[in-house]
Image: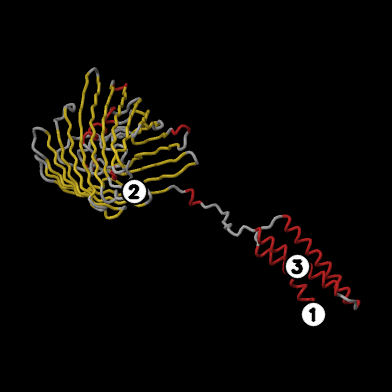
């Protein structure tokens, strides 16, 4: 009878160390050593118990030692469980390759048009204005990269002077909207973060920091087209060149913050420097003022200089811009007002002769609700080489169906002096997938 009672005790004492091991996935070396010692003592007592039973002797003392051994094993298991970190999660050590993939986005921009030129027949149609592919990713703790590749075609607007594409290398004018489609790398650059002294540095091909809109991608503009002075000075796509840019630490003076940017690039913009240039230097100063929790004011100035020694060309350009924004706190998604204006002055010296050009625009934008935005823009160019003085009026209505898709109805009235006016109606549909949607700067 005593042997039958001892067997469950021995079995329980044998399982206690294993029960502790099942509850505690990780043990220290000291606990494992203690468990091994207790197990060895249990084996020894079992052998003694079997010998005593075989000899017919009293086994009470051995039973007491087994009870003590059982208590010790339970205490060891309880201590191991108390020291275990139950909050730790078990993670697979298999490499997760998806973490190495860049953020990929795609944007579509299609524009339907109906033109009423003053001296030609009406035209209508639709243009796949831009399809942009975006790749963004961190390279390491210190650097990031952005790459934008885009297919684009020009949108016909009646009465506008023909402008150059403005990209790198030889390009054609935009007289035929369907003869100007092409796929190219719009931007591809790497930039550093967390540099000492709060400096900013980037290198590659990028949209340069001039004015208020050159940094914006085409699908993110507040109108279908860019302001007329920008397209005449830089071409249809804006000022995009290859080089490096350095942003100096911001300087706070009272309620304002001052920023200076220096860029050195190849002079490859065909509209500004001809077909292939040498070096281009850009400097930009920007002053930002917080007027109230709901309003800010910004003023900026930019200077650009570049050469094309092979063509005997030197180009100089000066730009001044102002911007005002009003948006009630906590309601900027539902109500906001923007006012922006820029003025440009450019000079080109070719073979001892100087060509100049001037232009400006004023833009108003009012958000009436989260979905509905009203806009209006006025452009004016004058003394621009051999082009007639021209002004353009551009009202528009934008409907945001969601943050991924918006539709825009726009009207362009263009009048080159002293000719009669030209009319164009545009309907734009823009959609995006991925984390990079309609990025503003």
Which one is closest to the eye, mark 3 or mark 2? 3
Q: Are marks 1 and 2 in contact (CB under 8 Å)?
A: no
First of labels 1, 2 by sequence position = 1
2 vs 395, nearest the viewer = 2
Residue found 31% across the figure and 44% down from its top:
151
Q: Quadrant of the C terminus?
A: top left
Q: The residue tagged with tag 1: helix, strand or loop?
A: helix
Q: Quadrant of residue 20?
A: bottom right
As measured in the structure, the alpha-carbon distance from the residue carrying label 3 to the one carrying label 2 is 66 Å
Q: The residue tagged with tag 2: helix, strand or loop?
A: loop
Describe residue 377's horizontal placement relative to residue 190 as left or right.
Answer: left
As measured in the structure, the alpha-carbon distance from the residue carrying label 1 to the one carrying label 2 is 77 Å
Question: Residue 292, how many percent across, how many down?
Answer: 30, 41
74 vs 267, nearest the viewer = 74
Q: How many marks?
A: 3
As measured in the structure, the alpha-carbon distance from the residue carrying label 3 to the one carrying label 1 is 20 Å
Q: Quadrant of the N terminus?
A: bottom right
Q: The residue tagged with tag 3: helix, strand or loop?
A: helix
| Residue that carries the numbered disc 3 in the rendered image | 71
Badge 3 crowding class, 10 Å Cα cut-off, few under 14, some 14 to 19, many 20 or more, is some
Tag of residue 439 = none
Looking at the image, residue 167 lies above or below residue 402:
above
| Residue that carries the numbered disc 2 in the rendered image | 437
Badge 2 crowding class, 10 Å Cα cut-off, few under 14, some 14 to 19, many 20 or more, is some
Badge 1 crowding class, 10 Å Cα cut-off, few under 14, some 14 to 19, many 20 or more, is few
Looking at the image, residue 212 lies above or below residue 305:
below
Looking at the image, residue 37 lies above or below residue 286:
below
Question: Residue 27, how many percent across, how many down?
Answer: 68, 57
First of labels 3, 2 by sequence position = 3
| Residue that carries the numbered disc 1 in the rendered image | 4
């Amino acid at each position: 009878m005593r042997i039958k009672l001892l067997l469950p005790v021995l079995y329980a004492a044998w399982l206690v160390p294993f029960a502790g091991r099942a509850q505690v996935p990780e043990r220290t070396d000291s606990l494992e050593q203690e468990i091994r010692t207790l197990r060895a003592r249990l084996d020894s007592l079992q052998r003694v118990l079997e010998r005593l039973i075989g000899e017919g002797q009293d086994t009470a003392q051995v039973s007491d030692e087994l009870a003590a051994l059982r208590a010790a094993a339970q205490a060891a298991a309880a201590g191991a469980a108390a020291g275990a970190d139950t909050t730790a999660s078990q993670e697979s050590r298999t490499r997760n390759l998806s973490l190495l993939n860049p953020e990929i986005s795609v944007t579509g921009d299609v524009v339907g048009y109906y033109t009423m030129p003053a001296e030609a027949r009406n035209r209508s149609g639709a243009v796949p204005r831009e399809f942009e592919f975006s790749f963004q990713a961190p390279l390491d703790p210190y650097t990031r990269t952005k790459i934008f590749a885009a297919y684009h075609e020009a949108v016909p607007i009646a009465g506008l002077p023909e402008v150059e594409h403005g990209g790198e290398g030889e390009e054609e004018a935009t007289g035929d909207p369907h003869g100007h489609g092409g796929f190219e790398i719009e931007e591809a650059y790497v930039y550093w973060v967390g540099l000492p002294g709060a400096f900013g540095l980037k290198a590659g091909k990028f949209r340069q920091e001039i004015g208020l809109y050159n940094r914006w991608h085409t699908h993110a503009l507040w109108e279908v087209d860019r302001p007329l002075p920008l397209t005449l000075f830089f071409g249809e796509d804006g000022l995009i060149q290859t080089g490096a840019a350095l942003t100096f630490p911001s300087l706070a003076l009272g309620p304002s913050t001052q920023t200076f940017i220096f860029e050195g690039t190849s002079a490859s913009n065909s509209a500004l420097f001809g077909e292939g240039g040498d070096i281009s230097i850009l400097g930009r100063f920007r002053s930002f003022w917080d007027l109230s929790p709901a309003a800010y004011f910004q003023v900026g100035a930019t200077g650009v200089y570049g050469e094309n020694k092979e063509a005997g060309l030197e180009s100089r350009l000066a730009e001044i811009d102002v911007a005002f924004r009003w948006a009630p706190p906590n309601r900027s998604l539902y109500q906001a007002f923007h006012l922006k204006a820029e003025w440009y002055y450019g000079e080109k010296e070719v073979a001892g002769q100087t060509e100049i050009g001037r232009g400006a625009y004023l833009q108003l934008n009012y958000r009436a609700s989260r979905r509905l935005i009203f806009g209006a823009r006025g452009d004016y160019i004058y003394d621009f080489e051999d082009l007639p003085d021209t002004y353009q009026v551009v009202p528009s209505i934008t409907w945001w169906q969601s943050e991924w898709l918006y539709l825009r109805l726009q009207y362009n009235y263009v009048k080159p002096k002293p000719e009669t006016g030209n009319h164009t109606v545009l309907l734009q549909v823009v959609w995006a997938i991925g984390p990079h949607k309609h990025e503003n700067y």
